[in-house]
Every structure is written in C-alpha cells, then in structure tokens.
Image (cartoon, grey):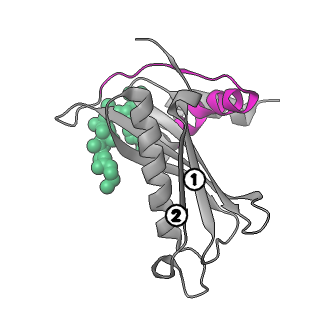
Amino acid sequence: MKGKTAEESKTTLTDMVLPGETNPLNNLFGGELLARMDRAAAIAARRHSARIVVTASVNHVAFNKAVPLDSVVTVEAKVSRAFNTSMEVFIDAWIEDRQSGDRTKANEGIYTFVAVDETGRPVKIPELIPETELEKQRYDAALRRKQLSLLLSGKIKPSDATELKAFFTEE
Ligand SMILES: CC(C)(COP(=O)(O)OP(=O)(O)OC[C@H]1O[C@@H](n2cnc3c(N)ncnc32)[C@H](O)[C@@H]1OP(=O)(O)O)[C@@H](O)C(=O)NCCC(=O)NCCS
C-alpha cells in the first residue's frame, strides 16, 4: 500500500456563525464547533484511507478563544499519523477579521478515526508521510497520544503504554 502525504488529506471548511449556533454570551456553542471539526476531520481521514471512516475518539480539544456571532470560522484538518487501521487527525480552527481578513487561531482539536469495511470491521490503511517540520512533530508525538487515549478508555494497561512511559521518564 503506497504512503500518502499529510497535505493530500488536507480539508478546509469555512462557514459563518449564525444566531442558532451560539450560547447565551453570543459566542459559538462548543458542541457546534466540535461537529464542524468532526466533519472536516472525517473528510481528511476518508481522503487518506479511501475508506468509510468512523470517529473512534476525541483525544483533545482546547477552546482557547471564544468565537463571536457572525465570525467567519475556518476549520482545517489533516491526518497527522496513520497506524494500522486508525488515524490521528489534527484540526485547527481560525477566525477571520471582517475588515483586514487577518486570521487568528481560535481553537484546536485532535481526533482519532478508524477505517472500516461495509460491515464496520477495521481495515488496513496507507502510511502517512509527514513533510513539514510541524507535520513531523505531530507525527512523532502521535504514538504517545494514541497510547494515552487507549489507556484512558481502558483498552490497554499502563504497562503497555511504553512510549508514554518513556516520555515521562525522559531526562
Ligand atoms: C472505532 C471502532 C471501529 C473500533 O473498533 P474495535 O473493535 O475497538 O477495533 P480495534 O480494537 O481493532 O481497534 C481498531 C483501531 O482503533 C484504535 N482505537 C480504538 N479505540 C481507540 C481510542 N479510544 N483511542 C485511540 N485509538 C483507538 C485501535 O488502537 C486500533 O488502531 P490500529 O489498528 O491503528 O492499531 C468501534 O469501536 C466502533 O465502531 N465504534 C463506534 C464508532 C462510531 O459510531 N463513531 C461515531 C460516534 S457516534
């Protein structure tokens, strides 16, 4: 199976924040942003694997900046690493200034998707080839995030999280 670059999976969704999507402070409701991230990340995972994909885990989300009503929000997703049947996807969310058009990073998320066949059984996927410095950093740290996610969901024992343990015992 031929590897694919992270860039090949890149997916960008741009949309605005409408009144029905806000909280009482008139900022974007968190669940709405999670859904937009999930949608972009699912497309990125599908582009990488050319398979049906399902969300296996939301590994991390940081709502660093509120996103006001009427903002233009761009969600950009890229596969950061492919394992056997699962993929880690990084999602960056940006807001755009109406007058200058300048973009500010508002939030980010890390999701895990699994490629499955028509019966929902996990299937093997191509390798991910990181190219830029940022893609390489995200690729290198992905295994310990996978182990942390599996540990938190009770799917592996602490003794199996070797990469994660090594990170904490590094000099
Ligand atoms: C995701 C799903 C396919 C995994 O099935 P499973 O029987 O646990 O399969 P496996 O144990 O073989 O795991 C498959 C892969 O997912 C990874 N995985 C499973 N749970 C994970 C988690 N919580 N975090 C990170 N990776 C996870 C495994 O490590 C494995 O990766 P690898 O093959 O690349 O090494 C299955 O749980 C499922 O269909 N869940 C529902 C998905 C869904 O409907 N999502 C939408 C939410 S409503």
Task: Tell me the quadrant of the picture where the C terminus can be found.
Answer: top right
Q: Which residue is mark 2?
A: 33
Q: Residues within 10 Å of mark 1 (few under 14, many from 20)?
A: many
Residue 21, relative to residue 45: is it above or below? below
Q: Tell me if I can see residue 39 in this picture.
A: yes
Looking at this view, is 112 or 162 the one in front?
A: 112
Q: Which residue is mark 1?
A: 75
Q: Residue at x 42, y 32 (%)?
A: 47
Q: Residue at x 47, y 38 (%)?
A: 44
Residue 38, relative to residue 68: is it above or below? above
Q: CA distance from mark 2 to mark 1?
A: 9 Å
The amino acid on which the numbered mark 2 sits, given as a three-letter code, is Leu
Whole-percent x and y of residue 36? 48, 58
Q: Secondary structure at mark 2?
A: helix
Is residue 76 shown in magenta? no
The amino acid on which the numbered mark 1 sits, given as a three-letter code, is Val
Residue 123, relative to residue 149: is it above or below? above
Q: Tell me if I can see residue 156 in this picture.
A: no
Whole-percent x and y of residue 127? 49, 19
Residue 164, relative to residue 58: is it above or below? above
Q: Residue at x 37, y 36 (%)?
A: 114
Q: Range of the magenta residues? A: 123-148
Q: Do labels 2 and 1 touch, CB within 8 Å?
A: yes
